[in-house]
Image: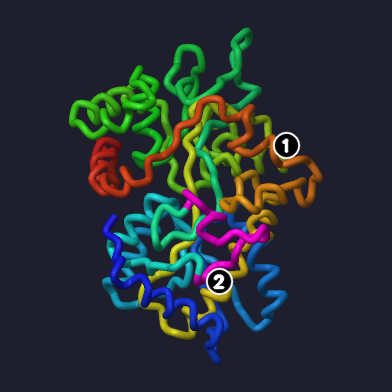
Amino acid sequence: MKLKTAMLAGTALLLAAPAAQAQDMADSMTLVSWGGAYQASQVNAYTTPYQEMHPEVEVIWDESSPEAVAGMRAQSEAGNVTWDLVDVEAADAIRLCDEGLAMELDHDEVLAPGDDGSSATDDFGDMIVSDCFVPQIVFSTTFGYRADQVPEGVEPPTGACDVFDLETYPGQRALNRQPIANMEWALLCDGVAYEDVYDVLETEEGIERAFAMLDTIKDETIWWSASAEPIQLLADGEVFMASAYNGRLFSAIVEQDQPIGMAWDWQMFDIDGWVVPADLPEDRLARVMDFLYFATDTQRLADQAAYISYGPARASSAPLVGTHAELGIEMAPHMPTDPNNAENTFVNNYLWWADYRDDLDARFQAWLAQ
């Protein structure tokens, strides 16, 4: 990573001061997230209680996180940064930090300590993959399938490699319109050992091999961009299997009682969290930092897990995770980290994708257009 270490101490002082000392904070914030069940969990756990404490603050939600990197690049180039806090996946946070589009933070200066007395950096631990990144949740991209469409006499799908088995599991699929996860699954399910996947994917032969595997299901695949799409495709019975975020699948299965099953094998682990755009005006920065301190403390991250099956990024939050806020069911068995769900997991290599994402995005979109 290209970290601006020489500037870090000064940046930390700049960021720590406004939230604590500023006389004037902006009375509105534009928060960028993913929509759907995940954004609803953020509203319930973060913004609703914050606005109860600060009724003068208007929160505006923008569901542009799938295009966060492009959006932040465009706003920076135009000199018109309209977003105040942006929810991104770990690899995108690294890219935005490297490009100077997200602010570097001293986590111990600007975030709350853990309820157990730990510092923020100790509490978040390895989840802090960039100096610009404030982790929120651990999630996975995994597969849902229509339980009522499993062929008679056939065992239900168990994981990612079943999406490539059109003979056993006929019907359309739905996959994300991006290379992350799809390229790894293609190689893994074509026989590449888990520990070798990224080494193989760094080669031209490996890229071609991944595309060749994806070619076997390309004609039977609907490519989604918004994270609500695969859930709707499954609910409507338009596809038999779909990759989707595990929390979205939880919402469809448990909250909406859809006839959908979960296939956890080779779920793709990832981390999601906040970045603060660079060059915010002082009053907006002060408001954002005040909110960020509140919204990422031990209790708030645990509260989010009462609304969606994503694991909180703070170690001190994990013991506070209990039952669903409305249904009363235990949430732990629905987490991607539960031992029954995590027998075979694929951990996203955030640093690798930060280096190769732009090139592979272009290759992937060109392949889709063929």
Residue 119 magenta-drawn? yes
Please, which residue is most extreme toward the right here?
328
Q: Identify whether 42 is placed above or below 357.
A: below
Which of disc 1 and disc 2 is earlier in sequence? 2
What residue is at 42 percent from the left and 30 percent from the top? Answer: 221
Left or right of residue 62: residue 47: right
The residue tagged 1 is 257
The circle on residue 344 is none
> Quarter of the image containing the C terminus?
top left
> Quarter of the image containing the N terminus?
bottom left
Please, which residue is most extreme toward the bottom here?
23
The residue tagged 2 is 60
Left or right of residue 190: residue 265: right
Q: Which residues are magenta?
A: 109-127
Q: Residue 85: x, y in percent?
A: 48, 68
Q: Identify whether 143 is placed above or below 50.
A: above
Image quarter for residue 300?
bottom right
Q: How many marks?
A: 2
Q: 242 or 20, which is in the foreground?
A: 20
Crowd class of label 1 (few under 14; some 14 to 19; many from 20; radius 10 Å): few
Amino acid carrying label 1: it is Asp
Q: 10 or 139, which is in the foreground?
A: 10
Residue 61 magenta-drawn? no
Please, which residue is most extreme toward the left here?
204
What residue is at 28 percent from the left and 28 percent from the top? Answer: 211
Q: 240 or 157, which is in the foreground?
A: 157
What residue is at 44 percent from the left and 63 percent from the top? Answer: 275
